[in-house]
Image: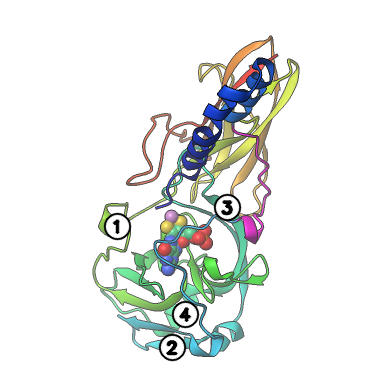
Amino acid sequence: MSGSGMTRRTWLTWMSAAPLAALIAPRRVRAGWFDALFSTPARTTPAITPNKDFYVTSCCSTPRPPKPEHWSLTVKGLVNHPITLRYDDVLARPAVREIVTLECIGNPIGGESISTAEWGGIRLAELLSEAGVTPGAVDLVMRAADGYSDSFPIRRALESDVLLAYTMNGDPLPREHGYPVRIIVPGIYGMKHVKWLTELEVVDQDYRGYWERKGWSDEALVKLRSRIDAPGDGEQVPVGVVTLRGIAFGGRSRVGRVEVSSDGGRAWQVASLAPPLSPHAWTHWSYAWRIPRAGSYSLTARAIDDAGAVQSADAGDPFPGGASGLHTVRVTAV
Ligand SMILES: Nc1nc2c(c(=O)[nH]1)N[C@H]1C(S)=C(S)[C@@H](COP(=O)(O)O)O[C@H]1N2
Ligand SMILES: [Mo]
């Protein structure tokens, strides 16, 4: 999956700069440098991620983009009428657009491997109904030009929100995001959104894809999660009113409420939510925090879905089914 980008960046910064700073910086400057080194800056997360900022996770190297006239997609297996579509055939079919958030199953709590785009393409269910899925079908297997493969239940593939996408925020799919065509399957972790698609096969058994064979979850349902984007971890804030903000995402379960705590999770206050741009997109939240007095605070957030399920506070690794736990940032009020 993705290595933890945050951890790697933090370590690189520490290891290259910290000893040097300790040796050469005068005492007063040193304090400032150290605060900066040990803190994570606040982030701003736009509702739609620009393509250039969208996270990228790939198992292997990015395949060389095919000439559109050399690409085709085959639908085969347990279907009455196998179909082969060329790029022009895909473009000629009725197009739809959906705003969908993707998150890597390897994304750590508070991590950056989550982004949102408006995907344009055709509905997979329409193609499958033309092909005529036969009884006994269990999984839809997706194969790609880089050798990657994965699957999800045929039941899910027949729902109307699953796309064969060929645009991303209005542009043709960028090379690293799956040009010419990829799958978008809302509410399932990024690993099932197969890029550089070449073949779809309907099969009569549970198929294990690239990451499942390495032990990752087969269902890969997105977990309810929230993240604090501001203030940044380790920041100093002035005593007064400070806006806490961040994102929450629950995949197929809707975010009903976000709560924040400034005392490490004993007392919780309800944050304001901005309505998400689509049922498949993340929710932005904010809270005007009145800081009572100078001191250290541990800020944490939790999401609650519209059925009342509360984001788990039990810290768990991304492997095998996605990270769990609450994102916490420490701030000093001065
Ligand atoms: N063909 C192919 N599709 C793939 C992958 C891959 O390695 N090869 N990686 C998957 C993983 S693990 C994730 S999280 C998403 C990431 O999509 P993105 O790079 O567009 O953000 O693509 C998925 N689709
Ligand atoms: Mo991923």
> Secondary structure of the magenta portion, mostly?
loop
- Residue 192 sits in quarter: bottom left
Instruction: Give left or right: position of 171 versus 70.
Output: right
Q: CA distance from mark 2 to mark 3?
A: 31 Å
Q: Are marks 3 and 4 in contact (CB under 8 Å)?
A: no
Kind of residue at disc 4: Leu
Q: Residue at x 24, y 68 (%)?
A: 205
In the rendered image, is residue 123 in sight? yes
**SS of the residue under disc 4:** helix
Q: Is mark 3 within 8 Å of ligand 1?
A: yes
Give the vertical position of 298 relative to 61 (above or below).
Answer: above
**SS of the residue under disc 1:** helix
Let me know if residue 46 is in the magenta part. Answer: yes
Residue position for label 1: 212
**Who comes first in sequence, dot 2 or dot 3?**
2
Residue position for label 4: 127
Kind of residue at disc 2: Thr
Give the vertical position of 292 relative to 13 (above or below).
Answer: above
Q: Which residues are magenta?
A: 40-53
Q: Please tell me the numbered disc located at residue 84.
A: 2
Mark 1: few, some, or many residues within 10 Å (few <14, many ≥20)?
A: some
Mark 2: few, some, or many residues within 10 Å (few <14, many ≥20)?
A: some
Residue 47: % across, % down: 67, 50
Q: Nearer the viewer, mark 2 or mark 1?
A: 1
Q: CA distance from mark 3 to mark 1?
A: 23 Å
